[in-house]
Amino acid sequence: MTHTTLSRQLKTLEDEGLIIRTEYQQIPPKVEYSLSEIGEKFKNVLSVLEVWGNEYIQYLNNKSKIS
């Protein structure tokens, strides 16, 4: 992922209210990102997707062994 792509994605997530960007006025510049309240609630969705993804990978691996 390029720096430009990452910056664009972070900006989109911030605009959509899923993350909070905190900028510190120091040298060198420092920026931190954290999940917003609604972003924290999305963690449950990601956990379920992770479980499904791992099960699907296992399914595909088992399927290729049979073929």
Image (tube, helix red, strand yellow):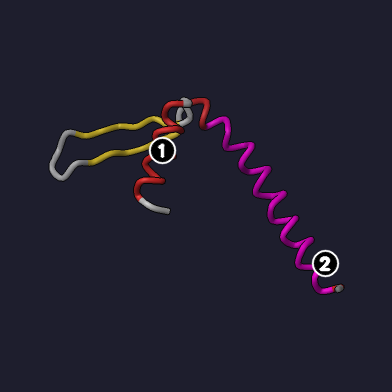
Q: Which mark is residue 63?
A: 2
Residue 31 location (% of width, % of height): 28, 39
Q: How many marks?
A: 2
Residue 22 location (% of width, % of height): 30, 32
Region rendered in magenta: 40-65
**Callout 2, which amino acid?**
Lys
* Residue closer to the observer: 29 or 64: 64
Q: Quadrant of residue 65?
A: bottom right
Dot 1: element: helix
Dot 2: element: helix
Q: Residue at x 51, y 31 (%)?
A: 39
Q: Residue at x 14, y 38 (%)?
A: 26
Residue 66 location (% of width, % of height): 86, 73
Task: Say which residue label 1 marks.
Answer: 10
**Left or right placement of residue 30 versus residue 14 in this view:** left
Residue 29 magenta-drawn? no
- What secondary structure prevails in the magenta region? helix
Q: Is residue 65 above or below residue 9?
A: below
Question: Quadrant of the image for the C terminus?
Answer: bottom right
Dot 2 and dot 1 residues touching (CB under 8 Å): no
* Residue closer to the observer: 44 or 13: 13
Mark 2 neighbour class, 10 Å CA radius: few under 14, some 14 to 19, many 20 or more: few
Q: Residue at x 52, y 26 (%)?
A: 38
Q: Residue at x 69, y 50 (%)?
A: 51
Residue 42 location (% of width, % of height): 58, 33
Q: Which mark is residue 33?
A: none
Give the CA separation, mark 2 to mark 1: 37 Å
Residue 55 magenta-drawn? yes
